[in-house]
Image (cartoon, coloured by chain):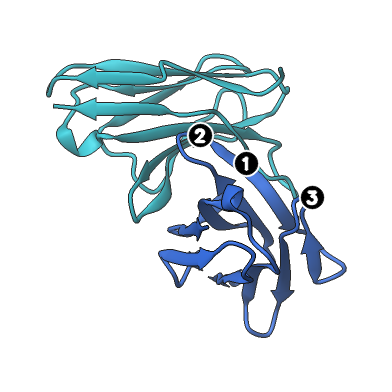
Amino acid sequence: NAGVTQTPKFQVLKTGQSMTLQCAQDMNHNSMYWYRQDPGMGLRLIYYSASEGTTDKGEVPNGYNVSRLNKREFSLRLESAAPSQTSVYFCASSEVSGPWGYTFGSGTRLTVV
Amino acid sequence: AQSVTQLDSQVPVFEEAPVELRCNYSSSVSVYLFWYVQYPNQGLQLLLKYLSGSTLVESINGFEAEFNKSQTSFHLRKPSVHISDTAEYFCAVKADKLIFGTGTRLQVFP
């Protein structure tokens, strides 16, 4: 099925460890996004990529880095995980502008202990 | 900049009762408006959207939302809820990027 695929679905890290969350879309969308979801705070934008070759900070970028590997793939990296980064992470994609909503992946539940 | 306020964090309701989930937004430019639904342990799915034209928009599962420009609101309503409507609902606005509200958890009781 066409859509946004995230891996892994679950991950437990120790404080200080690093990891990369992978995201791929097969809808030929130009824009891709990383959000984190925390109870009572909705979804907050971490980083986004309006088009291949560009990335920009969102609302909560500290502690994260991203790579837009190609048009399909957009990865999120935690260099030194902290307990405050325990969250559910969602990747999404869309057309660049206009009246289009986003298509979301199923999420990665990350726990940092 | 845009912002979204969902006034109720939780809405408990009995099955077959009507429900309204409130959403207000703030923006200095024209925006598109969306409602997303998140069922337990799943990602977000688009429920409905307002782009232009008729201010009342409907989803395939009986929800509707009305755009009110003067009150900057986009409240979501359903005349009779089912147990299966239990989920978290997010209002969102888009100018260049999608900005979400904090969500409303709808809990439907038998």
Asked if one can make out residue B97 in the rendered structure from this viewpoint, the answer is: no
Residue A9 vs residue B101, the one in the foreground: A9
Callout 3: 10 Å neighbours few (<14), some, many (20+)? few
Q: Residue furthest front?
A: B110
The answer to whether residue A55 is above or below residue A71 is below
Residue A9: give x, y in percent of width and height.
41, 20
Asked if one can make out residue B69 in the rendered structure from this viewpoint, the answer is: yes
* Of the image marks 2 and 3, the number of the one nearer the N terminus: 2
Secondary structure, mark 2, is loop
Secondary structure, mark 3, is loop
Amino acid, disc 1: Gln
Secondary structure, mark 1, is strand
Marks 1/3: CA–CA distance:
13 Å
Horizontal arrangement in the rendering, residue A1 relative to residue A9 (left or right): right
- Chain A drawn colour: cyan
| Callout 2–callout 1 Cβ contact below 8 Å | yes
Amino acid, disc 2: Gln
Callout 1: 10 Å neighbours few (<14), some, many (20+)? some
Residue drawn where x is 49% and y is 59% of the image: B109
* Of the image marks 1 and 3, the number of the one nearer the N terminus: 1
Horizontal arrangement in the rendering, residue B99 relative to residue A2 (left or right): left
Residue drawn where x is 59% and y is 14% of the image: A70
- Read off the residue under disc 1: B45
Note the chain letter of the blue one. B
| Callout 1–callout 3 Cβ contact below 8 Å | no
Callout 2: 10 Å neighbours few (<14), some, many (20+)? few
Residue A46 vs residue A54, the one in the foreground: A46
Residue A36: give x, y in percent of width and height.
39, 39
Q: Residue furthest right?
A: B53
Residue B101: give x, y in percent of width and height.
48, 59
- Read off the residue under disc 2: B42
- Read off the residue under disc 3: B60
